[in-house]
Image: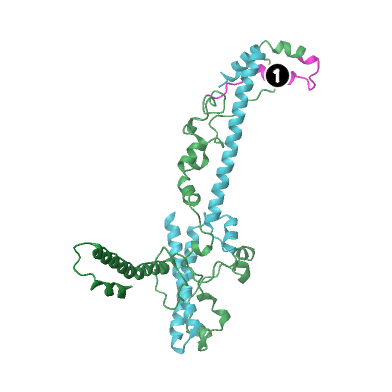
Chain colours: A green, B cyan
Amino acid sequence: MTEMFSTLFGQNEAQGPPGSASLGFGPGKPPPPLPQNQGSMTGQMPPQLGDEGPALRKPGAMNEPFYLLRELPVGNELTGNTNLITHYNLEHAYNKFCGKKVKEKLSNFLPELPGMIDCPGTQDGSSLRSLIDKPPVCGNSFSPLTGALLTGFRLHTGPLPEQYRLMHIQPPKKKSKHKHKHHRPQDPLPQETPSDTDPKKKKKKRDDDPDRKKKKKDKKKKKNRHSPDHPGLAGSQPNSNSLR
Amino acid sequence: MAEKFDNLEEHLEKFIENIRQLGIIVSDFQPSSQAGLNQKLNYMISGLQDIEKCRQQLHEINVPLEVFEYIDQGRNPQLYTKECLERALARNEQVKGKIDTMTKFKSLLISELSKVFPEEMVNYKAIHGEDAPS
C-alpha cells in the first residue's frame, strides 16, 4: 500500500514538485515585498481600460508595469499537494481498513455482544439516533436496591414467552477469532462455523485414508504379482478381491 | 488515552455479561433463583455507577454522528472509517492533480510570456523572484 502512496505522490513529495519552490508554491523563499509605489499605482488605475490604458501605464512602466499583482501564497502552507494521510501518520490506519476487506455486519465488529445486533435499531427502538433525539433523564445517582425495593422484582416461575427470548438468539457466527472470556452455558450453539467445518474436512480426509491405504495395498500387490520374484500368485488373488 | 477506553470497555463488557446472565435467570425463572436475581440487579446498578464514573474521563471525545447511523443499520462502524480514509485520499489526489496542473500551466505561461513580452517578464521576475520555467 505504501507503494501506492509513493506512486501517487512521488518519493520527493516533501520537497514539493520540481520547480514548485521556484514558482512560489513550494516551501522555498517567501515572496519579496511589493514596491511601495505599486499600491498607489493600483489606486491610479482607472476602472475602464480602454485606449487610455497604455498611456496611463506608461509612467508606471518605468518601475512597475503590472497592476492587480497579488502576493504569491506562502510556500509552507499545508495543501493537498502533500499526501495528507502520510502527513498525519495515518498509513497504518489506511492499510488496516483499506488494505483488506472489512466485514459488513456489526456482529463482526462486536462478536461477543449477545443478541441479534445486525437488525436495524429502528425496528426495536434500540437505535442510537433515538438516544440523541430523546436523551435520557440524567443527574439522578444510582443507588442500590434495598430489601423493600427488591420485592418489586419477585418473578413468577416458568419460562418466558417466545417473543421475549430474543436476547439469547445469536446470529450464526462464521469465525470467532477471540476466545470467549466468560463461560456461557445456556447459549445456543452457533449453527456452523469454519472451526466446525475444518474438522469435517479433516474427518473426510481421515475417512479417505483407509481407502487410500487399500488402493496402495492393491497397487503393491499387483506390482508384486508382476514381479518375477513374487512367491505365490494364486494365494494373493482372493485377498486382493476381498479388499476390493 | 487508551487506558480510558480500556476502562470503559471493561465496565461495559462486565455490564453486558451481567445483563446476559440476568436474562438467562429470567428466561426460565425458578423460585430458588430469586436471590441470584436480586444480586444481579444490584450488580447492574453498580455497573451503571461504574460506567457513569467513566463518563467524566471521556468528555473531550467526539464521535461523528454518521457512525451512529452505521451502528443503527447493523453495519460495521469500521466501514465508516474506511470510507472516510478512501474519500480523503481521493480528494487529496484530486487536489494534488489540480495543483500539479496549475503549476505546469504557470510554468508554461511564464515561458511563453517571456518569449512575447521579454522586458515585462524581466520586471515580473524582479518582483516575484526567479520564476524560471521548469
If the image is split into quadrants, where does the C terminus of chain A sit? Answer: bottom left
Q: Name the foreground residue: A227 vs A242.
A: A227
Secondary structure beneath label 1: helix
Q: Which residue is mark 1?
A: A40
Q: Amino acid at mark 1?
A: Ser
Is residue A129 visible from the viewing direction of this image? yes
Position above or below: B124 against A187: above
In the image, which residues are magenta?
A: A29-53
Q: Name the foreground residue: B55 vs A178.
A: A178
Residue sitting at 59 percent across and 26 percent down?
A: B104
Q: Position of residue A198 (x, y in %)?
A: 40, 66
Position above or below: B56 against A239: above
Q: Position of residue B87 (x, y in %)?
A: 58, 46
Count of all numbered marks drawn on residues in the image = 1
Q: Is residue A41 magenta?
A: yes
Q: Position of residue A78 (x, y in %)?
A: 54, 36
Residue sitting at 47 percent across and 84 percent down?
A: A147
Q: Residues within 10 Å of mark 1 (few under 14, many from 20)?
A: few
Residue A30 left/right relative to A209? right
Is residue A72 visible from the viewing direction of this image? no
- Tell which subunit mark 1 falls on: A
Position above or below: B99 against B74: above
Q: Is residue B104 magenta?
A: no
Q: Name the foreground residue: A13 vs A155.
A: A13
Residue sitting at 57 percent across and 40 percent down?
A: B92
Q: Position of residue B14 (x, y in %)?
A: 44, 69
Residue B129 left/right relative to A12? right
Residue sitting at 46 percent across and 42 percent down?
A: A2
Q: Name the foreground residue: A178 vs B37.
A: A178
| Location of residue B109 by image quarter | top right
